Image: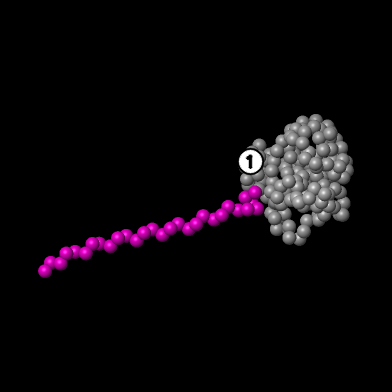
Amino acid sequence: MRLLVGLGNPGPRYARNRHNIGFMAVDEIVRRHGFGPWRARFQGRVAEGRIGGEKLLAQQPQTYMNESGRAVGEALRFYKLDPEQVIVLHDEIDLKPGKVKVKQGGGPGGHNGLRSIDAHIGRDYWRVRLGVGHPGDKDLVHDHVLHDFAKADDGWLDKLLDAVAAELPILLAGDELAFMSKVNQALVPPRPKPPPKPAPEPAGEPDKPSET
């Protein structure tokens, strides 16, 4: 069993915030893979499902971002899971919009949701970092992540969420490099190959010498 956690803040006020891209990604995973209904449990919302024969519990902590670890820790202890069985999807300002990277362990990098999870279960869980871009000034980061995505972002955002959900079985199978490659290709498809060059025309027969 795996615990699949999307990070965000609860309530309609925050629903379209950049900080809530983790919630959005888990919503799309639950929808695409036909998980059961959402229900209140472990200080959050949870939905159960299976992907590739493996049982997953999707979770959206309702504790607000800074206390996400309380909800994650409660679920982990109830199911007697190890941190390595937890996958957290979250916003990442140090990646360009639409980029995705996967890593296990590491520091919170200034992300308060990750910092809370670290405090409750340690650092050995997996992180799916979903790029939302940097505002260019560290003093603007707070407002940047707590503001809604712009309408112009919908094109790449929809593609990203769709690709993360579609390619998740690859990540669950243990191939994080292929998962990242597939998701990134979905947003920036490879350039089409140029058409083949036409074959050279066959040389004509040499002129016959005159018989006169």
The residue pinned by badge 1 equals 177
Give the residue type at disc 1: Leu
Counting every numbered tag in the picture gives 1
The residue lying toward the viewer, choosing from 75 and 196, is 196
Q: Residue furthest left?
A: 212
Q: Residues within 10 Å of mark 1 (few under 14, many from 20)?
A: few
**Residue 36 visible within the image:** no
The reply, left or right, for residue 185 in relation to residue 124 is left
The residue lying toward the viewer, choosing from 183 and 113, is 113
The reply, left or right, for residue 150 in relation to residue 195 is right
| Residue at the spot 60% in from the left edge and 53% down from the top edge | 189
Boundaries of the magenta span: 184-212
Quarter of image, res 121: top right
| Residue at the spot 70% in from the left edge and 38% down from the top edge | 103
The residue lying toward the viewer, choosing from 130 and 62, is 130
- Image location of residue 16, percent across then percent down: 81, 54
- Image location of residue 38, percent across then percent down: 82, 47
Would you say residue 185 sits in the magenta stretch?
yes
| Residue at the spot 87% in from the left edge and 45% down from the top edge | 64
Would you say residue 170 sits in the magenta stretch?
no
The reply, left or right, for residue 27 in relation to residue 170 is right
The reply, left or right, for residue 11 in relation to residue 172 is right
Quarter of image, res 209: bottom left
Q: Residue furthest bottom?
A: 212
